[in-house]
Structure formats: structure tokens, C-alpha cells
């Protein structure tokens, strides 16, 4: 399994090698080293501190600018985006859109390809995991921050947000039940709230279609991507984030989703301070059945 | 909850002549009632569908079993998790069996499981129900809407288990009109309970006590959700005023209820013990159980409340007192998730898709060579070892016996100290006796005597010990060549083990 990336970069090598040939003489050995560094980057679970050669190549990347340009060119040629090259994150590369390395929803979850509801739930699960991992803007910006998430915690967090929206709709006297013939117009929060959070199965595994099942799949996948590390089994599985995950969310996913949201005409206005604040009205704290604490918007 | 439409809008609609649509305001009450009606549909449906089951099941009253299942789950819902699936089935069985006593037990269990699974609606992907109803839009068009609801839902518990909880819809079907103020309802129920007990009307009192327990369960449920939200994010919650107020209020509530219920408990115990009528006695005994359960739930609630403060301080240390970051990051919740959730699903999917594509990282595609493929396909499957690897024989090294005293010495010392309860002895005499047997023995006897100086009476009592060695210092100096200190009076106390056992059954 682990030798596949090496094979790929071996194929990519001839394309990239001739490109930056201008100033200093680039030897085939340099190109091989640059490709090897990218190959290390393609093994996201490999830690630079654990591999001497990897660490050596990272040092060279930082100290030898022509070599750095060569490695960048190799990565770009392969359809990769370089997020950061540092001792903590290693050669953090990610797939550019339409690259052979990109993950497609259809490959990720077979049901999601056919069912738009499942497609949405899987996407939302990934966004919710990131939100729980970096609950405040400072957490996402702070390079030293390590987020912790649990599967049940993510589900509960989204449900809480959904409940808050439900309450608000009720207060406004809106009827949120969707029209029967237009499922696509149903409010997004209802889709999550409606799905059961877990379910008993015959073989004691997590029900794949339940929301904890969907979140569980997301964190397992992110763990394979080297974005999360499993730390325990409590609350459906506990995980902590890696430097790569922070980079990926901050530099790639967050901005891409933001751009899409803006294109839909939704402009969330904040002043950069925390948005998870208590609401102005305090009467929310009355103990009404099913209330929970005010979560805000 | 099924209140009719607002009256002052109705006449204006009527005067509008033959207009077919009564407008959304009047329609809202209708919609609410339709939804309430829909919640009962799964129960009727059970009786309608029992004919389709393989076998003759018409003897069973399925709606009755279903209602009692909802009842059981509500009562067995715990603070942290929910009701256990198997336990609910087991408790349903007596009722199912009573409906058809001559049928085999396996069939009873099948019926109980069938009802429970249908209340969860295991077959659907959402594990819920959907009812379709129609309303008029503000512009007068008739729209059919989907109403999704659950009766019993499955929630994750500790250790990956799945537990059952009843939803608010189900509780409404069960007891009705629970969306009143929890606190006042609870107080009312308990005042009523006290009055009923003092008048000796135990049948009514039991009903009231059960209602009070519903309230208690609902109250702790509300608080559980509140504390969960607190644990997720300190800033989501107003820790300056609102939450401390709420915690203080809840603690007051617990203290109040605890006092109250203990008083009730004493009253019912009296009623139970003094009553001649066996029916009265039985009801009182049941009431004792219910009130004890209420007290247990309150204690649980209180321990949760006490954990809230330290949790907040720890989270505050972590979040608020850190040095602020130099650059502002993207606020995932405020700028992405929160604006996303109210959007229509179709549009929201575009955003989540964009996030997914850019947020999942990379996968190295697997490329297959034909040569490898042939090898892989021709490799026989690995034999699985059922027993795992063989355990190596542990290499045990005998540790040298470095005890100060031997077993025989201990036995001799215990024999010396096995004093009759009515004849305690002085330590000096015991030491002299011991020295005659074995020069080492006095040390052990002295050690045991010192240990007996403050014996753990409570522990021994709880463990049902019948006798306990004790030693008392009455001020006499010990005159001994090897030891100094007080010449203790050593004796044996008899404990009332039988009385203890009786007390224990009483308390349980």
C-alpha cells in the first residue's frame, strides 16, 4: 500500500524535472529528491520526526530555495497544492480540484451518489467535525491549537443548533414542515434533526445511516487522511486534530465553502469576534421541556 | 397543545364570504391538531397491521402494548442514557402474556419486540414516522406538507450501547399537555400527593406520585441538555448571570424536593405499617418505591449540578485566558455552519459539497497491475485463527517469604485475643501470656491491640461481622520490658448482625 505514492511520483518525475532548469543546473538526483519529498507528503500519516530521510528533505526544502521550487513544481505537476512545508506538518500537500488524488463523494459513500439527502448529511458531518474541532476563530488561527472531538459530541452539537432553529421558527409561528412534492426546499437543519442519531443493528455495529454513523465515517476517513488521531473510545470515539487538518480547513475548505455560500447570496457579517455568545434575550432560560441552553446564532 | 385557532381572526375570515381558504392564522390551530392526531396514528396502525403478521395475532391488543411500552421507556429513562432495550421487552412480557396466557412464551416475546420495533420504526432510514397534511398558504394556495416525528428514539449511551428514549411527541400522546411549566406542575402534584396520603386515599396518591415522577424525569432531562450545551462551549452560555441563577434554582429545587419527599416517605411508611387492609398495604409499598426512585433521581441531578462550576472554570482557563492570536481566523460556526442550516437543503448541499471536496484531503488512487491481480485472485484466503496466538508459559519465580510473622504465629495471636465478650483483659497480661509461648509473639499481639484501639465499627457492622476486637486506654501505664505506652483494655464486642441484616432489607 505505502509504495503506491512512490510509484506515482516516479511517473510524475520526468514531467516536472525539465521545467525549472533555468538558473542552476538541476541534476536528476535533485529531481529524484524533490519527488521523494512529495511522495512523503502523499503519506499523510507519516510524521517527519519519525523518519530521518523525511526530516532531512524538509530541512533541504527550507534551506535550499531552488530545491524548494523544484519540489513545488513536482507537486503542482501532479495536481497537488502545497499548503505548508514545516517540521510540524511535514510536506502538507492536498489534492487540487479534479486531480487524481481528489476524493469524490460517490467513492466516499455509495448511497450519497444517488440520495441527495445522504449527500448533504455526509458533507455537513465533515463541516461539523471541523466546527467542533475549532470552535472559535482564534483556535483555527492559532498554530499550536489542538482540537478535540468526539463522535457523539459532534452529533449533539449539530442537534443543539438544529433545535435552536426549530425553536426560533416556532416562536415566529412559521410552519417548517416541507411541502410534500418539493423535498429540496426543506430547511437543511430539519434533514439532520429528522435522521435518527443511532440505532441498534443485528451485529452490534454502528448503524451506518444514523447521524452518529455518518459522523463516525467522517472522522474515520479524516483519520486515514492524517487529519485526526484517535485517542480513545469514549462517546463513540475521541479524536484530536493534527497540524495538517488545521491547514486544510483554514486554507482550503473553509474559504471554498465560504465562496460558495457568498455565491448563494448569503453574507454572514461578523466582526471577527466570537459568535458563540449568549443571546440578548434571557427568557430563553426558563425551564421548558426540551429547551436546552440558548445557543446562539 | 390542541388549542383552537385564535378567536378574533376567525370572524373576519367568515365575513369574507365564500372564500375557500380560511387563511394561515386559523389554519395553524388545525395544523397543530392534525399533527397531534398523527402522533397517535402509529399506535392504531399496529392493530390494523397485526393481521398481516404470520400467525394468529388478533388476540393481542397492540395499541395497549405500545402505550405501555412508551410508558415503560419514559419511566426507565435515566439521567445519562435511556432505557435498556432488553429490559423494556422483559417488562412488557407480563402484559403481553396476560392477553393470551395459553400461547407460548416465545410468541409473547415476538409480539413485544414487534411492537417496540414498530414504535422505533426500524424499517425506515430516519427511524421515524411521516404524516402528510394540508394547509393553506398566505396566498390561499393549498399545500401538502410532511410532518416528521418519532415516538421512541435510539440514543448512544456509554460504551457504545444503544438506549431508548421517548420523544416529546410520545410523552404528549402518553400523558398529554406536558408543555406546562415543569416547576409549578411538580409542586402542584406533590402538594396533592401529601394531602391524599394524609387522608389515606392511596389509590389516588399513587396516581399523583406517578405523575410527579414524570415531572421529575422531565426536569432532569431538561437539565441534562443544559449541561451538555455548557460542556460544548463556554461562550455559548451566559456564565455571568443566567447559568449560576439556574444552577442555584435547580439546587434549591433538589434540596426542597428531597426534604419534601423524605417527609412523604415517612408518612407512607407509617401508612404501610399501620394499615390492616392488604390492598392498602400493597399500594403503600408501591408508593414507597416510587418516591424512593424520585429521591434517587434528585440525588443524581444534584451531583451533576455540583460538577458544573469546576467544569466552567477549567474551560475558561483554557479558552479565555490564552494569549489572543495575532490574526483572526475564519469563524466556522458563525460564518459557515449557522448561516448554512436555515437554507433549503438543495442550496445548502452546494456549500457542503464545496467543503467536502476541499476538506477531505487526498487519497492516493490504487493502481493495479494485471500480474498482481492474478496473484491476488489466486491466493487462497487466509485461515483465521480462532484462538489467537499461543500464550507463552509464564516463567514464575518464587518470591521469598519476607513476612515478619508466620501463619502459625498469627493463629496463636488470634487465639490469645479470642476473648469472651464479658471478660476483657489488660494488654500486659496478654503480652505475658504471649511471651511464654514464643518470644516473637508479643510484638504481633501488641500490633493487633494497637490496631484495635480505634476499630472500624461502621464497616464491620455493614459487612455483617458478628464480633469485633476493641482496645480502650483507661490511663494505666504499661509496665513491660519491651513495650511502653498505655496498658490497653482489650476486649471483644458483639455486633447485632441479625438486626443489621433486617435493616439492610428495609433500606434497599
Image: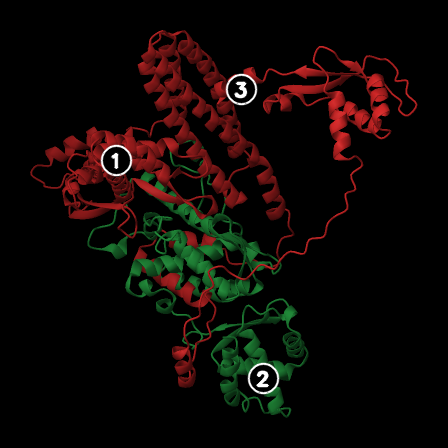
Q: Residue at x 37, y 30 (%)?
A: B75
Viewer-proximal residue among B299 and B62: B62
Task: In the rendered view, tell whether residue B158 sits above or below residue B3.
Answer: below
Q: Is residue B114 left or right of residue B441?
A: left
Q: Mark 2, chain letter? A: A
Q: Chain of mark 3?
A: B
Chain letter of disc 1?
Answer: B
Judge if badges 2 and 3 mark residues of a common chain.
no
Q: In the visual, does B326 lie left or right of A217?
A: right
Q: Disc 2 versus disc 1: distance between alpha carbons? A: 70 Å
The residue at which mark 2 appears reads as A70
Which quadrant of the rendered structure holds the N terminus of chain B? Answer: top left
Task: Give the SS element for disc 3.
Answer: helix
Image coordinates for residue B497, horizontal then vertical, percent:
58, 18
Where is mark 3, residue-wise?
A: B501
Secondary structure state at the residue bearing disc 2: helix
Task: Report which quarter residue B221 is drawn in.
Answer: top left
Neighbourhood count class around disc 3 (C-alpha, 10 Å): few under 14, some 14–19, many 20 upward: some
Q: Which residue is mark 1?
A: B66
Asked if disc 2 and disc 1 are in contact, CB closer than 8 Å, the reply is no
Residue B478, percent from left and from top: 88, 18
| Residue lying at 68% horizontally and 15% vertically, measured from the top left | B493
A54 vs A133: above or below: below
B345 in relation to B194, above or below? below
Residue extending furthest toward the front: B437
| Percent of width and height locating residue B327 | 59, 59
Tell me what residue is drawn at x 39 percent, y 66 percent: A108
Specify the chain shown as green. Answer: A
Crowdedness near tag 2: few (<14), some (14–19) or many (≥20) residues, C-alpha within 10 Å: many
Which circle's residue, 1 or 3, is located before the other in the chain? 1
* Colour assignment, chain B: red
Amino acid at each position: 500500500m505505502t509504495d503506491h505514492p512512490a510509484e506515482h511520483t516516479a511517473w510524475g518525475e520526468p514531467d516536472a524535472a525539465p521545467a525549472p532548469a533555468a538558473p542552476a543546473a538541476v541534476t536528476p538526483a535533485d529531481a529524484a529528491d524533490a519527488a521523494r519529498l512529495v511522495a512523503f507528503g502523499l503519506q499523510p500519516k507519516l510524521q517527519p520526526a519519525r523518519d530521518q530521510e523525511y526530516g532531512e528533505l524538509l530541512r533541504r526544502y527550507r534551506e535550499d530555495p531552488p530545491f524548494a521550487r523544484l519540489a513545488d513544481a513536482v507537486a503542482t505537476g501532479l495536481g497537488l497544492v502545497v499548503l505548508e512545508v514545516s517540521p510540524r506538518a511535514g510536506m502538507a500537500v492536498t489534492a487540487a480540484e479534479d486531480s487524481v488524488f481528489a476524493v469524490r463523494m460517490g467513492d466516499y459513500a455509495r448511497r450519497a451518489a444517488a440520495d441527495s439527502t445522504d449527500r448533504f448529511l455526509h458533507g455537513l458531518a465533515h463541516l461539523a467535525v471541523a466546527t467542533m474541532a475549532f470552535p472559535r476563530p482564534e483556535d483555527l488561527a492559532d498554530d499550536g491549537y489542538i482540537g478535540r472531538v468526539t463522535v457523539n459530541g459532534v452529533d449533539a452539537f449539530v442537534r443543539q443548533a438544529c433545535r435552536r432553529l426549530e425553536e426560533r421558527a416556532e416562536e415566529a409561528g412559521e410552519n417548517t414542515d416541507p411541502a410534500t412534492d418539493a423535498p429540496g426546499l426543506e430547511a437543511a437543519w430539519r434533514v439532520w434533526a429528522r435522521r435518527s442519531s443511532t440505532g441498534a443493528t443485528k451485529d452490534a455495529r454502528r448503524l451506518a445511516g444514523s447521524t452518529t454513523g455518518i459522523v463516525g465515517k467522517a472522522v474515520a476517513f479524516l483519520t486515514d487522511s492524517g487529519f485526526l488521531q484517535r485517542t480513545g473510545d469514549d462517546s463513540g470515539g475521541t479524536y484530536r486534530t493534527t497540524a495538517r487538518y488545521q491547514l486544510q480547513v483554514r486554507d482550503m475548505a473553509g474559504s471554498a465553502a465560504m465562496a460558495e455560500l457568498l455565491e448563494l447570496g448569503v453574507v454572514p457579517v461578523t466582526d471577527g469576534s466570537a459568535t458563540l455568545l449568549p443571546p440578548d434575550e434571557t427568557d430563553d432560560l426558563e425551564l421548558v421541556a426540551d429547551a436546552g441552553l440558548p445557543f446562539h446564532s | 397543545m390542541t388549542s383552537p385557532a385564535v378567536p378574533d381572526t376567525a370572524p373576519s375570515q367568515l365575513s369574507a364570504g365564500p372564500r375557500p381558504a380560511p387563511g394561515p392564522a386559523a389554519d395553524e390551530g388545525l395544523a397543530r391538531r392534525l399533527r397531534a392526531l398523527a402522533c397517535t396514528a402509529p399506535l392504531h396502525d399496529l392493530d390494523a397491521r397485526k393481521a398481516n403478521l404470520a400467525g394468529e395475532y388478533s388476540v393481542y391488543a397492540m395499541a395497549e402494548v405500545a402505550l405501555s411500552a412508551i410508558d415503560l421507556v419514559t419511566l426507565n429513562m435515566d439521567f445519562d442514557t435511556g432505557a435498556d432495550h432488553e429490559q423494556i421487552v422483559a417488562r412488557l412480557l407480563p402484559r403481553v402474556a396476560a392477553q393470551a396466557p395459553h400461547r407460548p412464551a416465545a410468541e409473547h416475546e415476538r409480539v413485544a419486540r414487534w411492537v417496540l420495533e414498530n414504535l422505533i420504526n426500524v424499517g425506515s432510514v430516519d427511524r421515524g414516522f411521516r404524516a402528510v397534511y394540508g394547509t393553506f398558504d398566505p396566498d390561499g394556495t393549498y399545500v401538502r406538507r410532511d410532518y416528521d416525528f418519532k415516538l421512541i428514539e435510539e440514543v448512544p449511551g456509554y460504551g457504545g450501547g444503544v438506549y431508548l428514549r421517548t420523544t416529546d411527541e410520545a410523552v404528549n400522546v402518553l400523558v398529554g399537555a406536558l408543555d406546562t411549566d415543569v416547576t409549578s406542575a411538580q409542586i402542584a402534584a406533590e402538594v396533592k400527593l401529601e394531602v391524599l396520603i394524609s387522608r389515606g386515599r392511596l389509590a389516588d396518591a399513587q396516581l399523583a406520585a406517578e405523575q410527579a415522577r414524570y415531572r421529575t424525569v422531565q426536569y432532569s432531562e431538561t437539565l441534562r441538555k443544559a449541561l451538555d450545551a455548557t460542556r460544548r462551549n463556554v461562550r455559548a452560555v451566559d456564565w455571568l448571570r443566567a447559568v449560576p441563577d439556574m444552577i442555584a434554582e435547580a439546587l434549591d429545587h433538589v434540596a426542597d424536593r428531597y426534604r419534601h419527599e423524605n417527609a412523604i416517605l415517612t408518612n407512607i411508611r407509617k401508612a404501610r405499617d399501620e394499615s390492616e387492609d392488604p390492598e392498602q398495604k400493597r399500594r403503600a409499598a408501591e408508593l414507597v418505591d416510587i418516591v424512593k426512585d424520585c429521591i434517587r433521581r434528585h440525588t443524581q441531578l444534584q451531583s451533576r449540578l455540583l460538577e458544573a462550576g469546576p467544569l466552567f472554570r477549567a474551560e475558561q482557563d483554557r479558552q479565555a485566558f490564552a494569549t489572543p492570536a495575532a490574526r483572526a481566523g475564519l469563524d466556522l460556526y458563525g460564518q459557515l455552519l449557522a448561516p448554512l442550516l436555515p437554507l433549503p437543503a438543495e442550496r445548502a448541499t452546494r456549500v457542503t459539497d464545496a467543503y467536502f471536496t476541499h476538506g477531505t484531503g487526498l487519497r492516493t488512487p490504487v493502481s493495479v497491475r494485471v500480474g498482481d491481480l492474478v496473484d491476488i485472485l489466486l491466493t487462497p484466503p487466509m485461515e483465521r485463527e480462532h484462538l489467537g496466538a499461543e500464550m507463552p508459559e509464564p516463567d514464575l519465580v518464587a518470591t521469598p517469604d519476607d513476612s515478619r510473622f508466620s501463619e502459625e504465629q498469627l493463629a496463636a495471636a488470634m487465639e490469645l485475643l479470642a476473648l469472651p465478650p464479658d471478660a476483657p483483659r489488660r494488654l500486659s497480661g496478654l503480652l505475658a501470656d504471649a511471651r511464654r509461648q514464643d518470644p516473637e509473639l508479643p510484638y504481633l499481639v501488641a500490633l493487633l491491640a494497637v490496631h484495635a484501639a480505634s476499630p472500624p465499627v461502621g464497616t464491620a457492622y455493614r459487612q455483617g461481622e458478628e464480633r469485633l476486637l476493641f482496645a480502650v486506654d483507661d490511663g494505666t501505664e504499661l509496665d513491660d520490658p519491651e513495650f511502653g505506652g498505655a496498658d490497653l483494655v482489650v476486649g471483644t464486642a458483639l455486633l447485632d448482625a441479625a438486626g443489621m441484616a433486617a435493616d439492610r432489607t428495609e433500606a434497599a
